[in-house]
Amino acid sequence: MKIIIAIDSFKGAAPSKQLNLAAKEAVLEVLPNADVETFSIADGGEGTMEALADKCQAKIEKVSTTDLMGRAIMAPYLKMGDRAFIESAKVIGIDKITPSQESFSQATSFGLGALCLDAIDKGCQELFIGLGGSGSSDGGRGFLESLSFDVTTCQLTEPGILKKTKIHALADVTNPYAGSTGFAKIFGPQKGGSPKQIETMDQEAQAFVERVKTCRGLNLQKVAGSGAAGGMGGAIAILGGEILPGFDTIAALLGLEKEMADADLILTGEGKLDGQSKAGKVPVAISRMGQKYQCPTIALCGSVEDDSNVSEEFLATFAIQRKCLSLKEALDNKTTLSNLKALVSNLMKTRYL
């Protein structure tokens, strides 16, 4: 029997890898001869580098650069042969600041370019840049400038830098670059921008859209995801890069779907299964992938909303809680892992013994 375990992190309680290992232990206690494959899960945002490092022959490289506020840092990226994965949050993550009007006006994506240049210098011909968790709202212009792109003329001053390198952005949001659903107006408030700052930023973004359209014949407003990560999606599109769906791309790099072809059961989950889970959340994506091979999927979650309208996506859905707990108690790491193991053990006994 082959079982795939690919549980997304329970935010505030346990990371994906820890949950997967706990579930695997529970399976093997009941079914010691089972073939159990675990996959740390990510969609291009937080934790993606670690997920890829677990499964891919990869080396972590560290680069001296600056964070979104210009402070010196050492930032890692993952080198996988002639490909590299760069997690933008490691450099320009919102977790590195307390969002404020000051940080909104000063935050820059410039430091991200150093990781790209280092990867290119080390022979990487394909770069994947995960855009989740960004704290900058500069339209990606700092990033462009770090790669010798003149944002006034919209030309590379050193065209050879990216000549032999493909660049991809990983993002699951589809917002355009500017306007009512652009990066400034949609994501600006959570990054500390005041209404006046956000309006000014959007006006600058719209002016940049027109400049790019005139100079390069590219309409960023028609590029789905160009508004991701404070406009980083648009910056990568300007450089000729594609904006790819985060989970699907990471799943392909991990070889997840290939493993599903002969699997008997998939265990997945997330902290909260609710109405938003159909909108690109990992557990539903995993279940739909498994359905291609008639492989049933069970979702194990911290909580399940009865009106989530998502139950039909799975063979079954379960909340791991065994008794009434306060939120603080439910988020305790040991409690979470213990509850998960107990549930998985009972499931295996019920279904397979």
Image: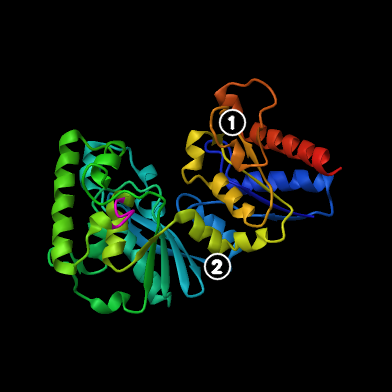
Q: What mark, if any, has residue 304 been given in the picture?
A: 1
Magenta segment range?
Answer: 223-227
| Residue 225 painted magenta | yes
Q: Examine the residues drawn in magenta and state their main secondary structure.
A: loop
Helix, strand or loop at mark 1:
strand
Q: Amino acid at mark 2?
A: Ala
Residue 32 in sight: yes
User: Is residue 140 in view?
Assistant: no
Query: In the displayed image of the protein, which residue is found farthest to the right?
Result: 353
Disc 1 to disc 2, how far (Cα)?
36 Å
Indicate the secondary structure of the residue bearing disc 2.
loop
Q: In x, y percent, where is residue 190?
A: 31, 37
Residue 62 percent location from the top left of the image: 44, 63
Give above or below for 268 relative to 303.
below
Mark drawn on residue 58: 2
Q: Is-magenta flag for residue 28?
A: no
